[in-house]
Image (tube, rainbow, N blue to C red):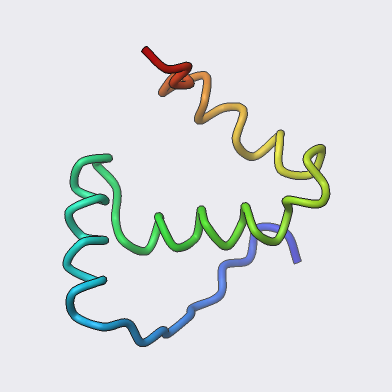
Amino acid sequence: MAGVAEDLTIRIDDNTFAKAETLAARQSASVGSLVTAVIRRLVHQDDPDELAPSTAPRQLDEGVRLGG
């Protein structure tokens, strides 16, 4: 079901959550969006063609860090 979002509840220790909040704030994102991104990467890592269309627009908007 593409386009349908599901709710997910997780349990995470306070220290890890605090660090995730800090990381999310640095990226102007939410902890939920970080979790979503990680799960998407894990699920789609075997099929890069499936992941590419969903990340391409974001990468065009935000740019891709190449180092340096």
Image quadrant where residue 31 sits: bottom left
> Image point 18% across, 74% down: which residue?
15
> Image point 27% across, 40% down: which residue?
27
Q: Residue extending furthest front?
A: 68
Residue 46 percent across, percent down from the top left: 81, 51
Query: Is residue 32 rendered to the left or right of residue 16?
Result: right
Query: Is residue 12 rendered to the left or right of residue 15?
Result: right
Residue 25 percent across, percent down from the top left: 19, 48
Q: Residue extending furthest top?
A: 68
Q: Which is nearer the eye, 44 or 55?
A: 44
Image quadrant where residue 2 sits: bottom right
Residue 45 percent across, percent down from the top left: 73, 51
5 up-or-down from 2: above or below? below
60 up-or-down from 40: above or below? above
Residue 24 percent across, percent down from the top left: 26, 51
> Image point 56% across, 75% down: which residue?
6
> Image point 40% across, 56% down: which residue?
33
24 up-or-down from 21: above or below? above
What count of labels does the image hold?
0
**Which quadrant: the N terminus?**
bottom right
**Which quadrant: the C terminus?**
top left
